[in-house]
Image (cartoon, rainbow, N blue to C red):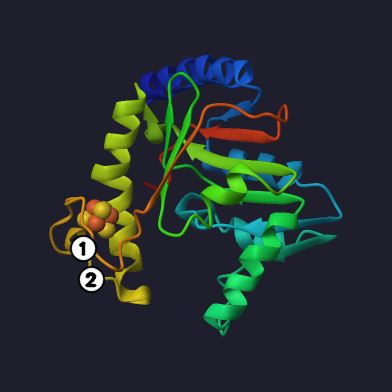
Amino acid sequence: MDAPLLSQREKLAAHIIKQLAARRMSGSFHATAKEAAKALLDSIPSPASVLRCGSESVGALGLWDAIAHKPGVTLMSPYEKGLSPEEAFDIRRRGFMADVLVTSTNAITIDGRLVNLDGGGTRVAPMTFGPRKVLLLVSMNKVAGSLEAAMDRVRTVAAPANNMRLAGPLGLKNPCVEDGRCHNCRSETKICNVWSIIEGSSVKDRIHVFLVGEDLGY
Ligand code: SF4
């Protein structure tokens, strides 16, 4: 990575980590995705049950396999091949009792707020309540200067890109799949139904954010 950009991201991350702490959350900075993946994996206790929620950032690093193979860890994955929709739904419901949730966030503000947009709430609900620990892998390309900028980022980048990723597997017929722009649609298959803004954590340090210098996800 370009040295000045990495330096800027490291300094900005230091500021964001202080903002997270003021909101009873914790954070750490890792220059590379590989270092962040190792830190996340090392932070999962053993034994533990781990709920998998959708995250391109985590998937891109091959972390799901690494978590599943960590001794003493049981990965609760609703994405296993061959599961019926009912079986996947059941795993998500039982996932509220998991020891750890691993996922990412669609955006993070410079003042430490976590901003997400979900289809059915299967990611934002356990981020908010349920698993004892929430581990988020978040690249610095997801940092936004304000709450408005974060929501705008989700609408203009994350949501259309996720629609394109899921269009084939889920048969989505949403307008953003055609032109890459959010139309704030009312489509039956839209994956943008539930906004979540996490302002802080009532349980201190329940949420930990691994900030990554390199770009990951969208
Ligand atoms: S067009 Fe619809 S499905 Fe696509 S990003 Fe916008 S609200 Fe979501």
C-beta proximity under 8 Å, tags 1 and 2: yes
Residue 46: % across, % down: 85, 52
Q: Most extreme residue toward the left, as rendered?
A: 179
Instruction: Work out whether residue 33 or residue 100 is closer to the camera in this orientation and state it.
Output: 100
Tag 2 secondary structure: loop
Q: Which residue is mark 1?
A: 177
Residue 81: % across, % down: 55, 80
Q: Is mark 1 within 8 Å of ligand 1?
A: yes
| Residue 40 lies in quadrant | top right
Mark 2 surroundings within 10 Å by alpha-carbon count, few (fewer than 14), some (14 through 19), many (20 or more): some
**Amino acid marked by disc 2:** Lys
* Numbered label tally: 2
Residue 77: % across, % down: 63, 67
The reply to whether residue 141 is visible in this rendering is yes
| Residue at figure coordinates x 53%, y 37% from the top left | 32
Q: Nearer the viewer, mark 1 or mark 2?
A: 2
**Amino acid marked by disc 1:** Val
Residue 39 in the image: above or below residue 93: above
Q: Which residue is mark 2?
A: 173
Instruction: Work out whether residue 123 or residue 57 is closer to the camera in this orientation and state it.
Output: 123
Q: How far is disc 1 from disc 2 in space, using C-alphas?
A: 7 Å
